[in-house]
Amino acid sequence: MLSTTSASPVRRMRVSLRGRGAAILLALAIELLIALLLLWMAPHIAPKPKPKTVVFGIEASEGEQAPAEKDAAKAPEKARRRAGEKAQAEQPTPPTAALPPPPVTPPVSSGSPSFIVMSRRDYAASDIAKAPASQSGDRGNAQAADAGGGSGANDTPRAGTGPHGETLYAADWYRRPTKAELDPYWPPRAHGREGWGEIACRTIERYHVTDCQELAEFPRGSGFAGAARRAAFQFLLKPPRLNGRYLVGSWILIHADFVQIGDPGDRN
C-alpha cells in the first residue's frame, strides 16, 4: 500500500511530459505549414530587362562631307591662323616717339612794375651813398640821400642802418596786417597791454619778407618785437624803390602796433 502511493507522482510527471512534447511538435508543424503557405501565396516579381544600346551612324549625302572630315579639313587652317597670330604677337612693338613738351607761354604782364632781384653784393654795389662823387653836385645828391631822401621824387626814403650795417628803407605796405593776424602772436607776458615792435626784414618776391631780426619794442621786455618777427611771414610789403626800380633783396624797417581794439596802425 505504501509503495503504490509513493510511485504515483512520478508516473503522473511522465505522462505530463509526454503530453507537452506532443503539443510542442504539433505547434512547430503548424507554423511550418503557415510559412509554406505564405511563400506559395507571394506574387512572383520578374526582373526588369536591361536596356539595349542603340548604335547608329550618319551618312553624308552626295556632295557633302562628314563632320569628322570637315574637322580634319579645318585643322590645318586653324593651325596656320594660330601660328600667324602668335608671330604677330611676338613682333617687337616700335618705340613710341616722345611727345615734345608744350610751349611755355610767357606770363602776361598785369601792368605792375617789374622787380629787380638783387644779391647782397649787387645791392651793396648799387648803394649810391657809398659811390665816389666826382663833382660837387654828386656829393650833394649823396648827402641828400643819406639825410633820408633819394635821387628820385618817388624813391623810398631811408630809415636807418640794420644790425649788420645794412641800409634800412621805410616800409611801404602792399597790404597792412589785421588785428586777427597779429593776435595769435600776442606775447603772454604782455597780456592785456598794448605796445609796438620794430623789426628789420629782407624783401623777397611776391611782396613777402624774410630773415627778420628784432630791433626795438615798447614796453621794454614785453616781447612785441618777437611777436612781430613771428608774424612777419604773412606781411605783404613793397620793395624799396630807387631811381624808378624796385630793389628786391634790400632791407626795410617794419613798425607793427599791437592794440586791443580795431586794426593795428603802423607808422612805417
Image (spheres, rainbow, N blue to C red):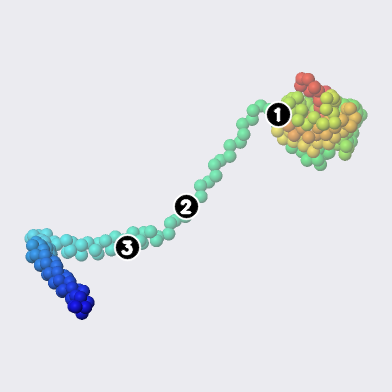
In the orientation shown, which residue stands out farthest toward the front?
Answer: 1
Residue matched to label 3: 83
Quarter of the image where the N terminus is located: bottom left
Tell me what residue is drawn at x 47 percent, y 55 percent.
95
Tell me what residue is drawn at x 13 percent, y 61 percent.
65
Q: Is residue 268 visible?
A: no
**Which residue is more in the foreground, 9 or 144?**
9
Q: What is the spatial separation of the Cα atoms under label 2 and label 3, in whole angstroms? A: 27 Å
Residue matched to label 1: 113
Query: Mark 1–mark 2 contact, CB under 8 Å?
Result: no
Q: Is residue 204 visible?
A: yes
In primary-sequence order, the first of circles 1 and 2 is: 2
Please state which amino acid type lies under the numbered disc 2: Thr
In the orientation shown, which residue stands out farthest toward the bottom?
Answer: 3
Nearest to the eye among marks 3 and 1: give it. 3
Q: Position of residue 101 (x, y in %)?
A: 55, 44
Instruction: Give SS at disc 2.
Output: loop
Residue matched to label 2: 96
In primary-sequence order, the first of circles 2 and 3 is: 3
**Mark 3 neighbour class, 10 Å CA radius: few under 14, some 14 to 19, many 20 or more:** few
Tell me what residue is drawn at x 14 percent, y 62 percent.
66
Picture disc at residue 139: none
Q: Position of residue 209 (x, y in %)?
A: 76, 34
Quarter of the image where the C terminus is located: top right
Please state which amino acid type lies under the numbered disc 1: Pro
Please state which amino acid type lies under the numbered disc 3: Ala
Within the image, what quadrant is residue 238 found in?
Answer: top right
Instruction: Give SS at disc 1.
Output: loop
Tell me what residue is drawn at x 17 percent, y 64 percent.
69
